[in-house]
Amino acid sequence: MGRMKGGTLVKLSNRQVKYDDQFRLYMATRLPNPHYSPETSVMVTLLNFAITFKGLEEQMLNQFIDHQMPEQQRKKNEILRENAEAGIELQKIEQDILTSLAKYEKISEILYDEKLIEVLGSAKKKSAEIKLRMKESEIAEKEIDAKRENYRAVAKRASLLFFCVVDVSQIDPMYQYSLKWFKNLFSLAVQQAPDSDIPADRVKSVNSEFTKMLYENVCRGLFEKHKLLLSFLLATKIMFGDDLIDPSDWRYLLAGPSASSDLMPRPPDFNWIPIKEWDDKCRQLCGMETLKKLAGIKDYFLSHSSDFQKIYDSPNAHEEPWPGEWDTKLDDMEKLILLKMLRPDKIINATQKFIVKHIGKEFIEPPTLELSKCFNDSTIKTPLIFILTQGTDPLDQFLKFAEELKKPKDYISLGKGNEKAAVALLDTAKQNGGWVLLQNCHLAASWMPQLELIVESISDTVHKDFRLWLSSFVCKEFPVSVLQNSVKMTIEPPAGIKANLKLTYTNFKDEDLVHEKKPEVFRKLLFGFCMFHSIVQDRRKFGPIGWNIMYEFNTEDLKVCMKQLRIILDDYDNIPYKVLNYLGAEINYGGRVTDDKDSRLIKTILLDYMNPDVLNEGYKFSPSGIYCTPGANNKKDFLKYIKKLPRFPDPEIFGLHDNAAIITAQAETRDLLETILNLQPRSSAGSKELERDKTVLDMAKSIEQKTPNAYDLEAIAQKYPVRYEESMNTVLMQELVRYNGLLTTMSSSLKELQLAIEGTVVMSKNNRLSS
């Protein structure tokens, strides 16, 4: 910046531009939680326009009343307008009076001005009329507000659900939803929900319809591992809104005990709990004593070993009643806490049961992806986005769906300089109403701002049949505005055999299950291949117990098997099972398998699903008989059978021991609770903030007291000298040096943390403390 005669110059790039002192720059961002450097923050004024819970509640109430009681809402708006105008008029009258009075220096002069007295009298009369009118308006407004309050619960539920969706957006950069999208969905739910003249019934129907509609729309854009998390968040948010959950219980479920406790040796009666598990269970039991309804659980647990052993050993621990008065005394959240201590591997199952009880069974059965439903929710300004995972490609689904609706379509993969060609395809499609699929947007991260401009520039003049389809892996550079106002669909194998089979048969048509020569044989052998496909997909959750290497099996493998089965049944009178097994296990699926042990395994698995016995109705694919050959003749019958299958399959269908699921279930539990914990607000205002600081301070003091002093290396070196015949002494000294470093760091960090909480020292961005 430089000075010149008559003004100031600012250097922008290579040019000097005249600067006016009246210049102001305003910037806005759509990012929900933008981060600015300290240098920027101290030079600008930051305004937070984020919506509050109460503010959104009022907006949603107004939106609902506009639909439910339009006349009442119009009347309220009219009253607000009239009152505002009346207030302005009163203020003007008062100002005129003061202006008139200011002309006179003495009060006695006012008494001889008849004109002024008339003006004052007229102003008094008019002021009284205005105040009377405003008072009548206030009475009418209170009557309208009383009717509006009957529907307050709808607005409160909507506000709760919006902030639940905001929480989900923190999990993955692709989970973005705008307030505009949310409000449009709310309006649709209000229109579709059954109407009633009884406010309570209307509230119930709207809340139910909107909660379910929101779940379905958000769920189809989530990865499988986050779908149960969404349901759990919805259930707990609603319960928090109804004051049905104690915040202390919720925090304990997610984070566990806040401070370390004195551990005790394992009593002889508890030899059914492994030593490596005892310390953790003991710590959690001590922590539970701080919770209201769980106080006393530690002593009861220690004195009733056999009662808790029954639950610990049960394959369905989440279904077992708790001993004594605890089953009736505890609520569902406290039972989850107790189960997490005793059998953490059953928390997923218990969470599912929790969701069913409080918001409904439909929230634990994610909807299958149907392009027709997604398409109905789209517009020319609303792109449809496929969120990809490894080994998935939605191109065939896109082409097939476009053929069904007889729409002109085109597609191109971004990257390698294809951006210009993509723009040309879009320009053509906008004119003739075609569909365009831009694949692999993550490969053109630098072009994403241009894509954002293209989407925002789409106007109502574009052909009404135009649709923009996009596909991308998770990409931080993907435009937030496009994500927030789009229809998102995740493309990945569903979790569980039931969900996998449901998706497979949902995508089938009745004609796909028809075979002219051997219709019944074809249907049953095809079901065998579908079961096999679900098994090899779902085995991946067991890690190295399932497969030594993670393989990206996909629906194309199943489609090829289906085509080959149809051809073989046409060409052979006697079914060549050996050929079907070879094609399936060694060519189609086996072509992806590289490990020799996995190759043997996949061949063995397919033998159970491709043999002559499969043609017998009721043939058991596992000892329990839960999974068997159904007597189904069409798509509807197969889906009816699949609907009865359990959501979480037992390991026996995979040929594994029940214990195989424990490690997997514990990892899923840990991931679920840690993810929810990361979504919780890190700080709060007032007394809650002080309470949080005290909790951390107590924890730091407790850990500091139990941190041992550093070892005396000189004394240990004399006691265990380094000798040729005692080589382990060298290792001992090396490990003690490292351990002393750890103890010293812990001791100093804990002291500084306490000083930081007390305000004596300052904690920097890098978590380094300085005076």
Image: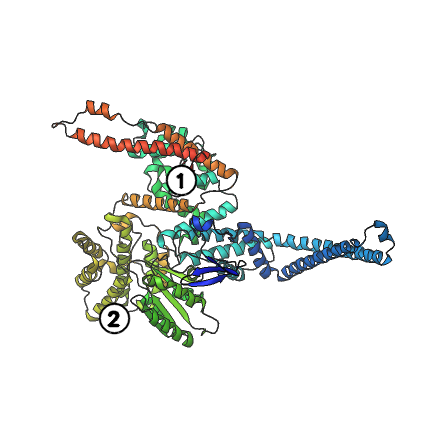
Q: Nearer the viewer, residue 11 or 182?
A: 11
Question: Considering depth in this image, is 71 or 763 the residue closer to the camera?
Answer: 763
Left or right relative to 332: residue 658: left
Residue 130 in sight from this viewpoint: no
Asked which secondary structure carries label 1, the reply is: helix
Q: Secondary structure at mark 2?
A: loop
From the image, tell me which residue sits under label 2.
Answer: 517
Q: Earlier in the sequence, mark 2 or mark 1?
A: 1
In which quarter of the view is residue 707 placed?
top left
State left or right for residue 309 relative to residue 381: left
* Number of other residues with Cα within 10 Å of mark 2, as a class: few under 14, some 14 to 19, many 20 or more: few
Q: Which mark is residue 468?
A: none
Q: Position of residue 314 (x, y in %)?
A: 33, 39
Amino acid type assigned to the residue bearing label 2 in the image? Lys
Q: Nearer the viewer, mark 2 or mark 1?
A: 1
Which residue shows up at 43% across the image and 49% down it?
39
Q: Residues within 10 Å of mark 1 (few under 14, many from 20)?
A: few
Verify CB contact (< 8 Å) between mark 2 and mark 1.
no
Quadrant of residue 466 within the rendered picture: bottom left
Query: Taking 708 as reference, is 364 left or right?
Result: right
What percent of the width, then of the height, locates residue 195? 56, 60
Residue 662 position within the rendered picture, expressed as x and y whole percent measured from the top left: 30, 43
User: How far from the left and from the top, in percent, is residue 72?
Assistant: 64, 59
Q: Which residue is mark 1?
A: 255
> At label 1, which amino acid type do we have?
Ala
Q: Where on the picture, by quarter, is residue 324? A: top left
